[in-house]
Amino acid sequence: MLNQRKPVEQMTEAEAAEELAFLAAELSRHDMLYHGKDDPEISDADYDALKRRNDLIEERFPALIREDSPSQKVGAAPSLTFAPVVHARPMLSLDNSFSDEDARAFVAGIYRFLGRLPDGSIAFTVEPKIDGLSMSLRYENRRLVTAATRGDGTTGENVTANVRTIGMIPQRLPAEAPDVVEIRGEIYMAKSDFAALNAEMAAQGRPLYVNPRNTASGSLRQLDAKVTASRRLRFFAYAWGEMSAMPADTQLGMVETFKAWGFPVNPLMQRFFSADELLEHYHHIERERPELDYDIDGVVYKVDQLDLQARLGFRSRSPRWATAHKFPAERAFTRLKGIDIQVGRTGALTPVARLEPITVGGVVVTNATLHNEDYIRGIGNTGEPIREGRDIRIGDMVIVQRAGDVIPQIVDVVMDERPEGTEPYRFPTSCPICGSHAVRDINEKTGKVDAVRRCTGGFVCRAQAVEHLKHFVSRNAFDIEGLGSKQIEFFFESEDETLRIRTAPDIFTLERRQESSLTKLENIDGFGKVSVRKLYEAINARRSIGLHRFIYALGIRHVGETTAKLLARSYGTYEHFGAAMTEAGGFSGDAWNELNSIDGIGEVVARAIVEFYKEPRNLKVLSDLLEEVTPERAEMPVATDSPVAGKTVVFTGSLEKMTRDEAKAKAESLGAKVAGSVSKKTDIVVAGPGAGSKLDKARELGLQTMDEDEWLALIGG
Ligand code: IVH
């Protein structure tokens, strides 16, 4: 894509300036896709070529070096360029439904949660799911004060200056609007505007943009608001954050109010009462899709009544009262050029298909997952044949499927087009990185052979160690700005002892080791004085860290973010957690039982954590790490003024005023922990009719017990 461009030697200064501006924006966009979204659009080679061109131009025109030039940063993270904004209410994502059955199950689940018969009495709204970027617009005293991207849901980026250039977004609200209003919705680029922009790019011989979504995102993240202004971005309002007063009591009523206040809202939004009607409107929107001037990737169903939404509440990342029903994935044919084996953090060997590049649903795909060795052989997870037993071979014509933000996968092969002389793929039985044996474990519970082959090298395996470090510094773990994949690999490989990072504690000793070193990081290609200082600042900023991030960063198998948060909330401090995990080492006794009684932690997870704490090497890394880093006390539950905040509650017997799920969700929203079994650590046992052994045990232990009415009186609901 670069060879159509003018050779650097022939460039005028003006052309060079323009090109540098373009490269800065383009490279920062790719950095964001790579680091922020894990969804690169271009190959590493193409990325490097862009970077080289940037260097060449800068070499010829040093006066033109920009502050935001990729040569000036380490692992450029565009998020640094915009100030952070903590959302007054978190910006959540949506649960997905992929079929008509999923959608019906969503409706049925709502009735079940609320303990109502599925009699068609609950209203739902249906609206398109816009494929753009979510945005939160905050108005105070009817003036737009802040526009922020979603970010990680808690903290976004302040893009107010850029958003002010979007003509469709009101700067002022009418007099009847309340004092604090947060409008949420989607910024997008119209398909027609995207086509016009690309026509312009083509006329100038410049590379084309890939799709409207990424272009909208890139346009919004410009440091120069004039660039954003030239891109004609648009907006649909569909949700809200903080509101000092509620202007309506239904979803539809809220959106109609937004429309009256001057916000664009989607004309296809409608309200229905039955799953059949929801699906009918879904299929209607699906048929309209090609005619719409904006990309959509499904529809969203929401419970219309806001009081019911409040009762339904939230799961960790998404509301229980809404779901996104996605359109079926798009597919395309292409040739399988090769199969690479990637080794992950837990040693899993994952086969990755290298493809002849192909556009699937507007995005160029060059890699796709092949899941595991059985999948390649035509065998499914339960041992039955898939694809009628057809195996996948290098050289095959394959069908690639891409669904929204899911990693593309190979779903089938075209046997008629299989070239002669191909052979079944031979999956390696040793790790391609460290050479250790790679084995398929036998599941203790089911006695079945695991589909995943794993490297047995553990700490010896470079790939596992490097992936561990990448996980440790990743966004939801330590989130160390300036330590991206490339930097981790560089530090890991370094021969110099004052530069080498092999385990997490090494990150925190780097600056000290560098002080007396002759090999200064700032003199190394790709790092400069400023970026090194920023790197140390970013590292030091994490010497104190949230307990859940700390636990998540350890990379214990099966411990994702949600589990880490549960653990942090349950144990409160690291000392407490670490001691309990060590004590649970025998897989029995109080500490073990307590771990297992945490609602949401099953035996497989509990075992994985305790096993982690039995491995001496892990303990060494942990104690070194704790010399450098202090995990904070876990954030106390949201509603500290509730009498049940911080208490451990067990529900037993049948409840009559609400369902078990609703009771649990409500208790958690008030800051209580809900456990599945009674122990010394239990504070309150709520017993309904039919309560048996749990109630007996509670009495035996002398715990506080109460019935449902007493509980409701206690929580004031
Ligand atoms: S409602 C609390 N409605 O989809 C739920 N989201 O996958 C708030 N999106 O982050 C979201 N169109 O950016 C909602 N009509 C729509 C939407 C929509 C697109 C995006 C939004 C959200 C993502 C979740």
Image (cartoon, helix red, strand yellow):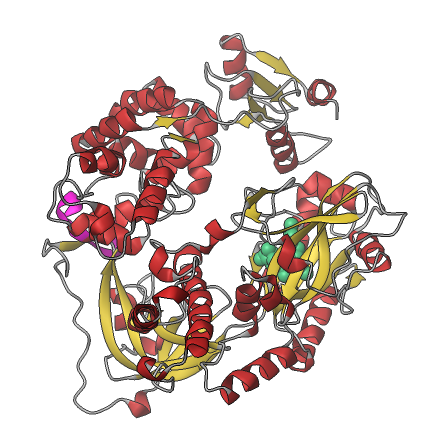
635 lies above or below 397: above
Q: How many marks?
A: 0
Magenta-span inclusion, residue 455: yes
Please state, as top left, top right, bottom left or bottom right, where the C terminus lies in the image.
Answer: top right
Q: For the point 29% across and 28% down, which residue is it?
A: 628
Q: For the point 15% across and 39% down, which residue is it?
A: 517
542 lies above or below 460: above
Q: Is residue 509 left or right of residue 121?
A: left
Along the viewing direction, whichever of 289 and 111 lies nearer the viewer = 289
Image position, residue 515 (x, y; %): 20, 35
Q: For the point 65% across and 32% down, which residue is it?
A: 666
Along the viewing direction, whichever of 383 and 475 lies nearer the viewer = 475
Q: Is residue 370 left or right of residue 495?
A: right
Q: Is residue 98 visible?
A: no
Q: Is residue 330 left or right of residue 520?
A: right
Along the viewing direction, whichever of 92 and 158 lies nearer the viewer = 158
Image position, residue 646 (x, y; %): 55, 21
Q: Is residue 171 visible?
A: yes
Quarter assignment of residue 563: top left
294 lies above or below 313: below
Picture quarter with ligand 1:
bottom right
Q: For the point 12% across and 46% down, which residue is it?
A: 460
Please state, as top left, top right, bottom left or bottom right, where the N terminus lies in the image.
Answer: bottom left
Along the viewing direction, whichever of 615 and 46 lies nearer the viewer = 46
Image position, residue 386 (x, y; %): 35, 72
Give the magenta part as a residue range: 447-462
Magenta-span inclusion, residue 241: no
Q: Is residue 714 left or right of residue 618?
A: right
Quarter assignment of residue 326: bottom right
